[in-house]
Image (spheres, rainbow, N blue to C red):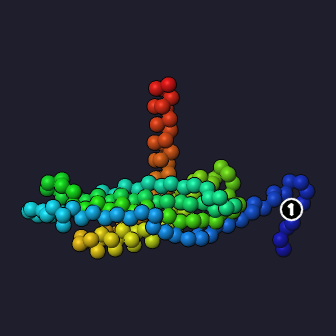
Amino acid sequence: MAEKAEGNGAAAEAPQVKMQILGQFIRDLSFENIVAQKGISGDAVPDVNVAVSLDAKKRPADHQYEVISKYKVTAKNKGTDNTMFLMELDYGGIFHIENVPDEQLHPFLMIECPRLLFPFARQIVHNVIRDGGFPPLNLDSIDWVSLYRQNLARQAESQKAAAKTI
């Protein structure tokens, strides 16, 4: 038998978070095959570097947000450090989000939304690099919480530096 909470001490149930992906899209995509343009001599062993950044903004419609994940993939030849290819992808999503408290909205947008977009962006990176003539790249999973914390720390440092110059 379930007990019923009585009196003013009963906590009101928080409304459930609602999230819906309204759309996904490629905002920008570029791939430069430097090897095809300039050629390469000797052994080609790619050393791949992946940089990820995020951007989010409120849209004019109520409860709608746009989140963009930006991937920059650079491959340099291990022996010569010459660039072999460069790929940049800005992959976005439009989200309808309700019942997220204001203080939790920014981390929600910068962690949960990119997490949902990532498998699609990973597939695009894989296919474009493969179709560009290189072995396909399977991006490792990303720790979005850690990335969010790193961005917060970087912003705090830049604000400190800006405050010192004033």
Closer to us: 50 or 15: 50
Residue placed furthest toward the right: 7
In percent of width and height, residue 67 lies at: 53, 60
Toward the left, the furthest residue is 42
For residue 59, above or below residue 163? below
- The number of discs equals 1
Work out whether 131 lies above or below 50.
below
Residue 32, horizontal then vertical, whole percent: 27, 63
- Residue 48, quarter of the rendered image: bottom left
Q: Which of the 4 quarters of the picture holds residue 59?
A: bottom right
The residue carrying pointer 1 sits among few (fewer than 14), some (14 to 19) or many (20 or more) residues within 10 Å by Cα, namely few
Image quadrant holding the N terminus, namely: bottom right
Nearest the viewer among 120 and 32 is 32
| 2 in relation to 52, above or below | below
Res 20 → quadrant: bottom right
Residue 94 at x, y percent in the picture: 57, 65
Using the rendered image of the protein, determine whether residue 161 is visible from the camera's viewpoint: yes
> Disc 1 residue type?
Ala
Residue 84 vertical position relative to residue 164 in the rendered view, above or below = below
Q: Please state if 88 lies on the left or on the right of 40 as rendered.
A: right
| Dot 1: element | loop
Residue annotated with mark 1:
5
The residue located at (57%, 57%) in the rendering is 109
* Residue ID at (15%, 61%): 38
Front-lying residue, 8 or 45? 45
Residue drawn where x is 50% and y is 51% of the image: 148
Residue 108 in sight in this render:
no
Q: Residue at 59% across / 52% down in the picture?
A: 106
Residue 98 image point, x, y percent: 69, 62
